[in-house]
Image (cartoon, grey):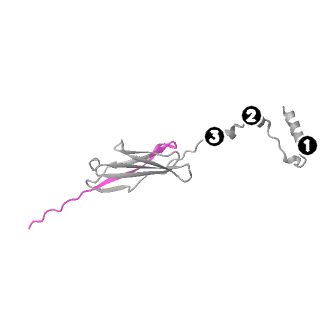
């Protein structure tokens, strides 16, 4: 088979006098008999871990006694988009709202999660964790805030 390929290349070269002999190179025989698998293979999608998550207002969030708390955590620049969970005292908190935004490069995404906690469900000194994970970091990246509840105390009465 190798001789036949060389002969057909040689004949083609003889019939194209405008192309110098060294400039023409025949395709390797395997490219004519087998599909080029590398050319048709879809590239594996690149996995990008999210940036370190950020809780707005952290690391200490202060609020007045009796006020509810809204916490927002951002996990940016991930592919695929990060999943965010909230944790308090080792337990996952449910009820958070999520949104994802495709970035300008059309590949990476940012995730925002907002968690609402009623006033009866929070205590001063509590630590709340935001954990962001995706395929690139299955164990996730974490950040936390500490809650500081400001209590208003009435001044002692004045006696005259």
**Local secondary structure at mark 1:** helix
Where residue 55 appears, x then y in whole percent? Answer: 40, 53
Lower position in the chain sequence, tag 2 or tag 1: 1
Q: Quadrant of residue 158?
A: bottom left
Where residue 70 appears, x then y in whole percent? Answer: 35, 52
At a point 63% along the width and 40% down the height, the residue shown is 42
- Res 34 label: 2
- Could you tell me which quadrant the N terminus lies in? top right
Q: Quadrant of residue 35?
A: top right
* Residue at the extreme left of the image, as rendered: 160
Q: In the rendered view, would you say 4 is above or below 92?
A: above
Badge 1 density bin: few <14, some 14–19, many ≥20, Cα 10 Å: few
Badge 3 density bin: few <14, some 14–19, many ≥20, Cα 10 Å: few
Where residue 107 appears, x then y in whole percent? Answer: 56, 48
Q: Within the magenta stretch, is there residue 105?
A: no
Q: CA distance from mark 2 to mark 1?
A: 27 Å
At a point 56% along the width and 50% down the height, the residue shown is 106
To which residue does mark 3 refer? 42
At a point 80% along the width and 40% down the height, the residue shown is 27
**Local secondary structure at mark 3:** loop
Q: Within the magenta stretch, is there residue 139?
A: yes
- Could you tell me which quadrant the C terminus lies in? bottom left
Between 137 and 3, the residue placed more toward the observer is: 3
Lower position in the chain sequence, tag 1 or tag 3: 1
Are the two marked residues, 3 and 2, in contact with CB atoms closer than 8 angstroms? no
Q: In the rendered view, would you say 158 is above or below 146?
A: below
To which residue does mark 1 refer? 14
Q: CA distance from mark 3 to mark 2?
A: 18 Å
Image: magenta residue range: 132-160
């Amino acid at each position: 088979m190798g001789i036949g390929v060389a002969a057909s290349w040689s004949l083609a070269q003889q019939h194209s006098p405008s192309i110098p002999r060294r400039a023409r190179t025949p395709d390797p025989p395997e490219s004519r008999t087998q599909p080029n698998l590398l050319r048709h293979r879809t590239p594996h999608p690149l996995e990008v871990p999210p940036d370190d998550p950020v809780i707005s207002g952290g690391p200490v969030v202060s609020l007045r006694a009796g006020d509810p708390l809204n916490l927002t955590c951002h996990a940016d620049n991930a592919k695929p988009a990060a999943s965010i969970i909230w944790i308090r005292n080792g337990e996952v908190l449910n009820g958070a709202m999520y949104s994802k935004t495709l970035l300008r490069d059309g590949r990476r995404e940012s995730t925002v999660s907002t968690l609402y906690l009623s006033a009866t469900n929070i205590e001063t000194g509590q630590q709340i964790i935001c954990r962001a994970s995706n395929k690139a970091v299955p164990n996730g990246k974490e950040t936390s805030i500490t809650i500081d509840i400001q209590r208003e105390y009435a001044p002692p009465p004045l006696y005259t």
